[in-house]
Amino acid sequence: MRLPFLRRTALAAGTVLVVLTITFVGLHLAPGDPVRLYLGADADPSAALALRHDLGLDRPLAVQYADWLRRFVVLDWGVSIAQRRPVTAVIGGALGPTLLLTGLSLAVSWVFGLLVGTLQAARRGTRTDHALTGLTVAVQAVPAYVLGLGLVLVFAYGAALRDWPAFLRLPAMGASSVGADLLEPGARLADRLRHLILPVTTLALIGAGGLARFVRATTVDALRHPAVRVARAKGLGEWRILLSHAIRSSAPPLITLAALQLPALFSGAVFVETIFAWPGMGRVAVTAVLGRDYPVVLAVTAVFAVLVVAGNLLADALAAAADPRAREDA
């Protein structure tokens, strides 16, 4: 098992390298000059030349790439062109909020996805099953930014205009209210949780839709297994059969699906963090792309790529632990 795992790790590292290479070349070939954006269109040509030399942008692209890759491997990620501070500081301040947002979204989507999918499997073929199928398909088809804007219109602006109860009027921007640092710890935590509700709901609803459909399909398929018929013959209830037999046998593919959700969560976080002004890596990435801040864009891309491939490796390991047959193939 050790050799296949090492082979997959090497493949994951190669995938990250390919993603970074494509991003590096694409950034430098795209229209726009970071020096002009930073200094302004009317900047003195000599000052622009000096800054371009300081940033190493006057060298051949291959030389820039080799030098950047050498420094990047040793975690020397350079200095942000726009903010003029280390990229590690920029990423360090944004990584925590993004992991909090995506982690909570993944947990909430799994709770709702498992509940809805299991309910559909238990009520398969009924009106409840058909209604939930239509609802999950519709939610999954809505882009993250459209769903996020819709929630803002309803629970932020709409709730304020209609004078809804205070607990339904949710904040739509930022990670905390103005002056939240002066609150007591409990009130500060409650304020942070209120700011998390809309962005977490946006990401979780989209993930829960696809997960519920997958849970329904795998559970219905598992219910056709001979062991389930034996359990029914012993007089076990339907819900006990679902929990003890069907869902347990569906665990390995569900674990794999969790890893496949990570790319969608991170890409969705880019839009969601921008809409809700959440201080995470998605918002940092959008700002850096617009400002042609090459070091920050490359660092954000690397972190996202590493998180995605690490999630896939973890899913492979968990699936092998849950299913002996997968362990033999690993």
Image: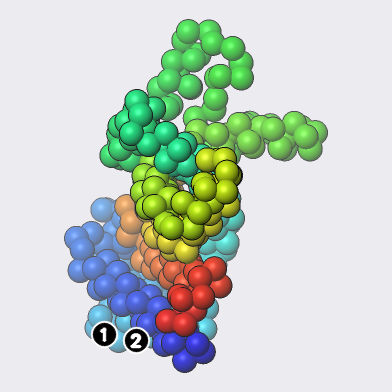
Quadrant containing the C terminus is bottom left
The kind of residue tagged 1 is Ala
- Answer left or right for 288 relative to 324: left
**Residue at mark 2:** 66
Q: In this view, does 132 lie to the left or right of 6?
A: left
Residue placed most toward the observer, 55 or 91: 91
What x and y, as percent, mark residue 149?
A: 37, 30
Mark 2 and mark 1: Cα distance apart in space: 6 Å
Q: Please give the label number shown on residue 202.
A: none
Circles 2 and 1: CB atoms closer than 8 Å: yes
Decide if residue 219 is in sight here: yes
Q: Nearer the viewer, residue 283 or 249?
A: 249
Is 145 on the left or on the right of 330, as rendered? left
Count the marks: 2
Q: Where is residue 150 in the image (x, y as percent from the top left)?
A: 37, 27
User: Eyeballing the image, is 225 above or below 315?
Assistant: above
Vertical placement of 178 versus 243: above or below?
Answer: above
Q: In this view, does 254 lie to the left or right of 33?
A: right
Residue at position x 40%, y 22% from top? 153
Residue 138 position (above or below residue 256): above
Above or below, 180 against 31 in this view is above
Residue beneath disc 1: 62
Residue nearest the observer in this picture, 115 or 283: 115
- Could you tell me which secondary element the residue under label 1 belongs to? helix
Asked if residue 284 can be seen in this view, the reply is: no
Residue type marked 2: Ala
Question: Percent x, y for residue 280?
Answer: 50, 50
Q: Which residue is drawn at 46% across and 10% down?
A: 161
Residue farthest to the bottom? 3
Identity of the residue drawn at 29% across and 59% down: 36
Q: Is mark 2 on a helix, strand or loop?
A: helix
Residue 262 in the image: state x and y as whole percent: 43, 58
